[in-house]
Image (cartoon, helix red, strand yellow):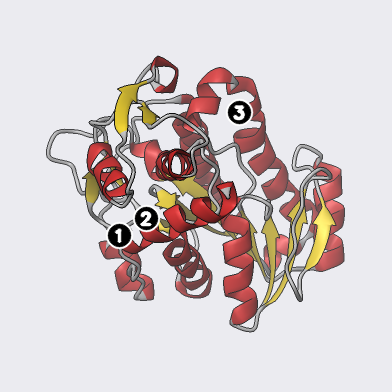
């Protein structure tokens, strides 16, 4: 299978390319002009998804069998600060990709995976966790609203034009190499800096009471590959561990792995205007259709992420 990853320079892109190439898929990727992507056996194209004509030209050149649409503004906190940019990339960019597929004609032969988020479910009804794919989204932040819009557009295009569009709602995925604007990576980076003497022994935190469903990025990309191979067109799949964990317990695990005496302080700049209390996936559907389930424990993910930052800060 010839695959194309749109937006490969992000956290997930490198892991997905490695997964696909390792399993024998001919894989090409796209990045912005100012982004770096280094992977053996992988051709790199420069692409801005806000330019529909350039997407169309790329599709005509590459003629992929399957597209993984990873290009997104994926930070909840940044979406509050820059909702216009988040909307442009996550909604207008996705429309450009789908329309370019139709106009180039590859929609007749190629499939596409639209990457959404568990954040789309937002403020779920009492008793609705774990959340099934049938739950009505109630987004609680700007990022989630744009991803919910993407999912609705994908569903409409799949029905209206017979396109092979598959959608996922990926719950919180973590691992080595993630930017420290995300909570697990943030805590691990701060801990590594404290251990190396680069900062005082205080970890700055936001809301620790929220519960999130954490999955290792290496398990997530396995899910994406299996969905591309076995998922059903027009369907939506949750990708998560199926178990929500309170942020405070994540922090306790990370601090417990350090030999430093670390204190915790709330930083008001890390608090969001609105925070969804709990998000937890029901993964019955993806397991039934693809056989996927996570294999890497949260403990291992934390160990690997902390070790990544220890090497990085030193």
**Badge 3 density bin: few <14, some 14–19, many ≥20, Cα 10 Å:** many
Furthest-bottom residue in view? Answer: 24
- The residue at the point 63 percent across, 50 percent down is 10
Q: Is residue 173 visible?
A: yes
Residue identifier under label 3: 87
Residue identifier under label 1: 299
Q: Is 145 situated above or below 51?
A: above
Q: Quadrant of residue 50?
A: top right
Check whether the beta carbons of the residues at disc 1 and disc 2 lie within 8 A of each other. yes
120 lies left or right of 299: right
* Residue 163, horizontal then vertical, whole percent: 60, 58
Residue depth check, mark 1 versus mark 3: number of the one nearer the observer: 1
Distance between the alpha carbons at the discs numbered 1 and 3: 35 Å
Furthest-front residue in view? Answer: 197
The kind of secondary structure element at disc 1 is: helix
Distance between the alpha carbons at the discs numbered 1 and 2: 5 Å
- The residue at the point 45 percent across, 61 percent down is 220
Q: Is 63 situated above or below 187?
A: below
């Amino acid at each position: 299978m010839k695959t194309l990853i749109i937006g490969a320079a992000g956290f997930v892109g490198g892991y997905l390319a490695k997964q696909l190439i390792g399993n024998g898929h001919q894989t090409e990727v796209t990045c912005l002009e100012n982004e770096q992507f280094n992977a053996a056996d992988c051709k790199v194209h420069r692409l801005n998804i806000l330019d529909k004509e350039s997407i169309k030209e790329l599709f005509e050149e590459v003629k992929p069998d399957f597209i993984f649409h990873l290009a997104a503004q994926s930070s909840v906190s940044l979406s509050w600060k820059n909702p216009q940019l988040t909307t442009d990339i996550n909604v207008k960019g996705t429309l450009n990709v789908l329309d370019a597929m139709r106009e180039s004609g590859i929609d007749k032969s190629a499939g596409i995976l639209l990457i959404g988020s568990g954040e789309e479910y937002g403020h779920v009804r009492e008793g609705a966790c774990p959340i099934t794919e049938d739950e009505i989204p109630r987004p609680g932040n700007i990022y989630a609203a744009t991803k919910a819009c993407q999912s609705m557009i994908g569903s409409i295009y799949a029905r209206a034009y017979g396109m092979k569009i598959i959608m996922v709602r990926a719950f919180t995925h973590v691992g080595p190499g993630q930017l420290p604007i995300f909570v697990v990576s943030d805590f691990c980076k701060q801990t590594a800096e404290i251990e190396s003497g680069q900062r005082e022994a205080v970890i700055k935190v936001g809301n620790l009471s929220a519960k999130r469903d954490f999955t290792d990025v290496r398990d997530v990309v396995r899910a994406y590959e299996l969905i591309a191979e076995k998922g059903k067109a027009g369907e939506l799949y949750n990708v998560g561990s199926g178990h929500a964990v309170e942020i405070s317990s994540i922090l306790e695990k990370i601090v417990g792995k350090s030999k430093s005496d670390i204190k915790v302080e709330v930083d008001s700049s890390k608090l969001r205007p609105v925070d969804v209390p709990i998000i937890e996936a029901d993964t019955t559907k993806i397991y039934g259709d693809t056989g996927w389930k996570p294999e890497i424990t949260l403990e291992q993910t934390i160990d690997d992420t902390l070790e990544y930052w220890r090497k990085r800060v030193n």
